[in-house]
């Protein structure tokens, strides 16, 4: 029995106990003597277990780590740190747990409380390896895949859980709740991860408010996303309230999805496990690389007064019916502001939609017979303010739409669309509004209200998560191999000592964002240059910005395809003739161009059926070098005229690698790339993996 053992320890330590590997479980309320404990999960039931009801454990800031935690190899972490099963009224406070698959796992618990816990460094997929991005798509709808992932805390079949002030960063997933209900999640921080900040599956009637899940993203196909999201709920998650959460800079900010949606091979539409009746209120999903808010195959959800700026799409609502999208701010969408394919009886009212690259509101249905089972029909579009859009409203095979009192300014609509007068809808009465306001943590701010950098350009992966800028005077990342992007926080920074061989330029409307590059030189031979400079804070604190940049010159030539068909890839003579001939554009630049998504790589170039040849010379030391590419479509890399990577085919985002031994000296590198149609991607990286 453990109880006598605990009693003797309490007597010896003045009311505190010391954790040991030989302990079986904790069965009474205790305080843990502050310290760092290394405990292993020897049998899969937990390195430490709670095995009683009505237990409060205060760890007083203690740390529990697995024996392998210090290796830093998160993909190898196994077991459970703290396990609680089939108990009621258990409270866990003030503990740091690292190094397990699930740092806390609770099954079938009632009234469980997790408070002020630090649970980062759980099992995670490795998204950067030797400087190369690993493109790994997450299985959003597969619960068994979820079980193979890791999480800071996993709660399953828990009733009335209360999670407050829990933090988990630099991992894959934060909080996962499965088949759990009537819970509250408040004041938590699950930012700078690579999977999901908060994820719900078959969980209903929960209140999730005043949390951060910013910068939850991962590399994918030359860009970002891979079905990562700040928050996600999938498969029969109903009547949850999401209020005042910040989930900016993520793959999707908010992602709501069904278990199985879409047409099968026989043309039958499947919509199993839809999510319904959720309230999504005053959240911020801005700067998401896919959609600020996504809700597919869902019904009767309400999106009210959220912020959805600077994302690819503001709202993506495919196959959604009966939803209300009201009073939201949707500005600078890279594609459409609101998009819904095959969605009926939705209400789009009182939204502010500005500066949209595509359609401010885009509703459509396919023309094939099968799409008639889920038409785009009977949608209400009222009292929206739409300013500066390629199209103010686009309806494609969308029938019986009702338009009332919308303002379109520099946002053209079809002359066939007629508006009427109507009342729209009044202010919505948000459930549990006063309770939500009473739960607001002291000092809570949305990410956009901080003095930290904002925008996709600040997305930078670490080995397992995303780069965290919160604790540095001057956040920085590499814009490209030659350019340092530096954010000078004006309230904190007094001075930046830039080396004399470097120069600063400021572009755009953000005066605190600096681009630091080597000064131009005439040397045609590129080389690696280490940099190190000091940032001095107004408090006297000093930090150093240090790393290595690649100072070289790429000679880049652009071409139109000589023939626009799939068979062109195998026409080697045709490509040789093309590349030996005149280019449609030539330029010299310090890095390869950014090629990602569905847009033209540069102004004046086509977005489809183009090719590029880029060559440079670089001084390298002797050793073995590995070249890695991510491409969509064709890619070839030659070093000193020798093919190292050759995937000259039509393909989606694909990673290729090759290696070779090089002698010390100057070497030529040539990159050939071609894009047929659809999405595009190009990333080229090399690193020394061995020395002679």
Image (spheres, rainbow, N blue to C red):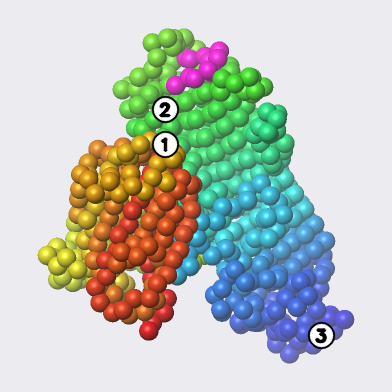
Q: In whole angstroms, how far apart are the C-alphas of marks 1 and 2?
A: 34 Å
How crowded is the residue under tag 2: few (<14 C-alpha within 10 Å), some, or many (20+)?
many
Picture quadrant where residue 690 is located = bottom left
Residue occupying the point 59% across, 52% down: 138
* Residue numbers of the magenta segment: 394-404
Q: Among all residues in the image, which is located at the extreme bottom?
A: 12
Picture quadrant where residue 605 is located = top left
What mark, if any, has residue 360 been given in the picture?
2
Q: In whole angstroms, how far apart are the C-alphas of marks 3 and 1?
A: 77 Å
Q: Is residue 15 left or right of residue 322?
A: right
Q: Is residue 422 left or right of residue 158?
A: left
> Does any portion of residue 539 appear in the rendered image?
no
Numbered disc total: 3
Q: Among all residues in the image, which is located at the extreme front?
A: 573
> Does any portion of residue 369 appear in the rendered image?
yes
Which of 683/615 is in front?
615
Percent across and percent down for residue 51 are 82, 70
Percent across and percent down for residue 680 are 41, 45
What mark, if any, has residue 565 been given in the picture?
1
- Quadrant (top left/top right/bottom left/bottom right) for the C terminus: bottom left
* Local secondary structure at mark 1: loop
Percent across and percent down for residue 496 are 22, 68
- Compared with 344, 61 (above or below) is below
Q: Foreground mark, 1 or 2?
A: 1
Q: In whole angstroms, how far apart are the C-alphas of marks 2 and 3?
A: 67 Å
What mark, if any, has residue 5 been given in the picture?
3
């Amino acid at each position: 029995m453990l109880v006598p053992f605990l009693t003797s320890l309490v007597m010896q330590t003045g009311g505190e106990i010391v954790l040991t590997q030989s302990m079986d479980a904790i069965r009474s309320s205790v305080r843990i003597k502050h310290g760092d404990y290394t405990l292993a999960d020897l049998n899969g039931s937990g390195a430490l277990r709670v095995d009683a009801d009505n237990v409060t454990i205060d760890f007083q800031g203690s740390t529990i780590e697995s024996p392998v935690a210090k290796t830093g190899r998160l993909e190898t972490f196994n077991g459970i740190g703290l396990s609680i099963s089939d108990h009621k009224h258990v409270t866990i406070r003030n503990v740091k747990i690292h190094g397990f698959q699930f740092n806390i796992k609770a099954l079938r618990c009632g009234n469980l409380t997790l408070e002020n816990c630090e649970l980062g460094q759980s099992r995670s997929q490795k998204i950067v390896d030797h400087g190369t991005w690993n493109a790994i798509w997450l299985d959003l709808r597969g619960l068994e895949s979820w079980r193979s992932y890791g999480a800071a805390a996993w709660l399953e079949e828990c009733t009335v859980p209360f999670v407050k002030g829990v933090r988990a960063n630099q991992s894959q997933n934060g909080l996962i709740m499965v088949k759990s209900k009537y819970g509250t999640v408040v004041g938590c921080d699950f930012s700078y991860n690579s999977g999901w900040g908060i994820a719900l599956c078959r969980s209903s009637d929960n209140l999730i408010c005043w949390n951060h899940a910013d910068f939850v993203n991962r590399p994918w196909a030359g860009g970002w996303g891979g079905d990562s999201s700040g928050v996600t709920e999938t498969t029969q998650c109903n009547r949850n309230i999401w209020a005042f959460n910040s989930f900016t800079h993520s793959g999707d900010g908010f992602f709501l999805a069904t278990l199985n949606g879409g047409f099968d091979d026989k043309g039958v539409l499947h919509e199993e496990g839809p999510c319904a009746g959720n309230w999504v209120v005053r959240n911020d999903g801005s700067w998401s690389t896919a959609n600020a808010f996504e809700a597919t195959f869902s019904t009767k959800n309400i999106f009210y007064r959220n912020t959805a700026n600077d994302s690819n799409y503001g709202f993506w609502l495919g196959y959604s019916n009966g939803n209300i999208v009201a009073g939201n701010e949707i500005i600078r969408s890279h594609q459409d502001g609101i998009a819904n394919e095959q969605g009926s009886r939705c209400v789009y009212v009182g939204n502010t939609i500005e500066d949209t690259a595509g359609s401010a509101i885009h509703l459509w249905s396919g023309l094939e017979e099968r799409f008639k089972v889920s038409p785009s029909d009977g949608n209400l579009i009222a009292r929206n303010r739409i300013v500066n859009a390629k199209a103010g409203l686009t309806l494609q095979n969308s029938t019986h739409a009702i338009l009332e009192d919308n303002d379109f300014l520099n946002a053209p609509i079809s002359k066939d669309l007629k508006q009427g007068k109507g009342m729209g809808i009044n202010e919505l009465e948000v459930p549990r509004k006063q309770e939500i306001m009473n739960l607001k943590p002291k000092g809570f701010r949305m990410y956009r209200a901080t003095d930290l950098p904002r925008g996709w350009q600040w997305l930078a992966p670490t080995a397992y998560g995303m780069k965290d800028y919160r604790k540095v005077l001057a956040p920085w990342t590499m814009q490209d191999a030659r350019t340092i992007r530096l954010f000078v926080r004006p309230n904190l920074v007094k001075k930046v000592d830039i080396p004399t061989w470097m120069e600063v330029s400021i572009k755009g409307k953000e005066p605190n964002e600096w681009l630091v590059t080597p000064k131009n030189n005439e040397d045609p031979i590129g080389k690696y240059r280490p940099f190190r400079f000091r940032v001095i804070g107004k408090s006297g604190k000093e930090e150093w910005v240090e790393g290595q940049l690649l100072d070289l010159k790429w000679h880049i030539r652009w071409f139109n395809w000589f023939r626009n068909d799939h068979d062109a890839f195998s026409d080697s003579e045709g490509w040789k003739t093309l590349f030996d001939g005149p280019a449609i554009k030539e330029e010299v630049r310090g890095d390869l161009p950014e090629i990602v998504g569905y847009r033209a790589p540069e102004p004046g170039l086509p977005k489809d059926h183009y090719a590029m040849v880029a060559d440079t010379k670089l001084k390298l030391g002797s050793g073995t070098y590995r070249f890695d590419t991510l491409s969509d479509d064709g890619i070839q890399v030659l070093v000193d005229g020798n093919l190292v990577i050759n995937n000259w085919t039509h393909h989606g985002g694909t990673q290729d690698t090759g290696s070779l031994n090089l002698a010390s000296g100057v070497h030529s590198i040539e990159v050939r790339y071609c894009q047929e149609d659809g999405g595009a991607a190009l990333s080229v990286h090399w690193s020394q993996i061995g020395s002679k």
